[in-house]
Image (cartoon, rainbow, N blue to C red):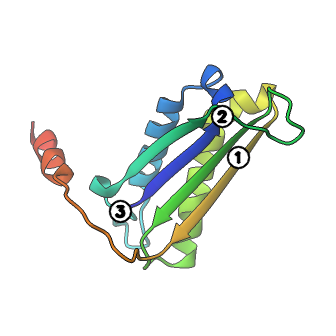
Amino acid sequence: MPHLNIQYTANLDALTDMSALCRGLAATLVALRNDDNDPLFPVAGTRVMAWPAPHFAVADGQPDRAFIYLNLRITPGRSDALKKRAGDAVLASASAHLAPVFARHAIGLTLQIDEGAPVYEGKRNNLAEHLAKAATA
């Protein structure tokens, strides 16, 4: 972890590059450091995924209204100050990417951070191995 899941109204696909938003938010998460200047989140555990909602009603239901919901799921163990630092950074990154959309359209943007240990978490992962190979290539 972190896992950042993005739900958004499908009308945003014509207004912004959602893949670029995902890449930018992943870079933001990976760049975050704790108070000892260590990574706040593991690179190999970072995931950012987005899903459009083709059917939606936002505010008064006008078809040009838009909404993005960011849900950042993290494991426990970080201070409230570090969680706020992460939230502020993710919100600032998303806001910067979406600035042209905000300038022309009615849009809502919400970030929620959830923290907690799952009841069960199964994993199979070779991303760290591939990242190490890529770094030496």
The residue that mark 3 highlights is 39
| Quadrant position of the N terminus in the picture | bottom left
Residues packed near mark 1 inside 10 Å, few (<14), some (14 to 19) or many (20 plus): some
Q: Which residue is mark 2?
A: 98
Q: Position of residue 10 (x, y in %)?
A: 63, 30
Asked if the residues shown at circle 2 and circle 1 are in contact, with their CB atoms under 8 angstroms apart, the answer is yes
Mark 1 or mark 3, which has the lower sequence index? Answer: 3
User: Where is the C terminus found, in terms of image quarters?
Assistant: top left
Instruction: Decide if residue 123 is on the left or right side of residue 25.
Output: left
Q: Quadrant of residue 75?
A: bottom left
User: What kind of element bears circle 3?
Assistant: loop
Tell me the mark number nearer the camera, choosing from 1 and 3.
Answer: 1
- First-in-chain label (2 vs 1): 2
Q: Which residue is mark 1?
A: 109
For the residue marked with disc 2, what is the amino acid? Leu
Compared to residue 25, the image places residue 15 above or below, namely above
Residue 58 at x, y percent in the picture? 80, 40
Q: Identify residue type, mark 1.
A: Leu
Q: Residue at x 44, y 46 (%)?
A: 48
Label 2 vs label 3, nearer the camera: 2
- Viewer-side label of 2, 1: 1
- The span from disc 2 to disc 1 (Cα, nearest Å) is 9 Å
CA gap, disc 2 and disc 3: 26 Å
The relative height of residue 115 versus residue 98 in the rendered view (above or below) is below
Residue 89 against residue 118 in the figure, above or below:
above
| Type of amino acid under label 3 | Pro
